[in-house]
Amino acid sequence: MKKLAIDLDSTVWQILDIFVPLYNKKYKTNVKVGDIDRFHFFPQERFMKIYKKTTKHIKEFKPVRGFFGSYIEELSILYDITFLTHGNYTKKKVSKKLESMGVWGDFYQDIIITKEPKADFDFDYFIDDNPLMVADMKQYPEKTLILIPTTYNYYIADEYDNILRWMNWKQITEYLITGFI
């Protein structure tokens, strides 16, 4: 069975709707989610402070547009699925949140919370929003990254055969099941 790694933040659930108001309040700014046009939009030190506060609101995270637990259920028939994140979470909290979104424990193999580069893990496919993974994937032409489109990764050129960009979870699921859309 092929192995599939799925990111959480801005791939399964939307954190920016919580992050941005916390950031604006703390730093007295007026940033809107749509203003975030690059991955390192926020100064890293400020980002990390607010990100840690944001992850405490995990119960409030909403699914990204178009995400349904039924897609994970469909994919689990053909793939060993692991949720792979750099997030500041515990496995227990992630598991409970996924369950609240209709993603039951028997749909996936594991939840891995890491600081290591995700591309270094032994997976055939990655679904992620992080544009920095594109550079990492150059080293692994046998692996495929499906880049979830966001306002901060649209600038990524589609110059690699192992980087795909689909617009929504329905398209991703169709591709991973059938090999084409």
Image (cartoon, rainbow, N blue to C red):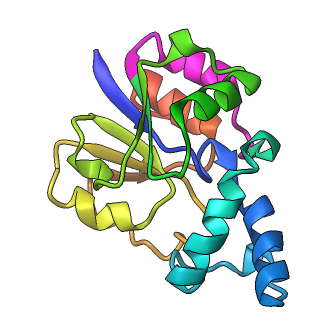
- From where the camera sits, is residue 40 visible? yes
Where residue 78 sits in the image (x, y, percent)? 40, 14
Q: Is residue 15 left or right of residue 25?
A: left
Q: Is residue 135 magenta?
A: no
Determine whether, in the image, residue 106 is placed left or right of residue 101: left
Query: Quarter holding the N terminus?
Result: top left
Instruction: Estimate the x, y position of residue 46 in percent, counting from the top left.
Output: 60, 81
In percent of width and height, residue 80 lies at 37, 19
Within the magenta stretch, is there residue 67? yes
* First to last magenta residue range: 64-80
At which x and y percent is residue 67? 69, 36
| Placement of 51 over or under 35, stated as above or below | above
Residue drawn at 73 percent across, 66 percent down: 19
Q: Is residue 148 above or below residue 38?
A: above
Q: Residue at x 66, y 53 (%)?
A: 55
Query: Image check: 99 left or right of 6?
Result: right
Name the foreground residue: 56 vs 30.
Answer: 56
- Of 106 and 128, nearer the camera is 106
> In which image quadrant can residue 121 be found?
top left
Q: How many marks?
A: 0
Q: Can I make out residue 151 in this image?
A: no
Reply above or below: 70 against 123: above
User: Which image quadrant is residue 178 in?
Assistant: top left
Question: What residue do we see at 47% from left, 50% from top?
Answer: 128
Residue pictured at 49% horizontal, 20% vertical: 75
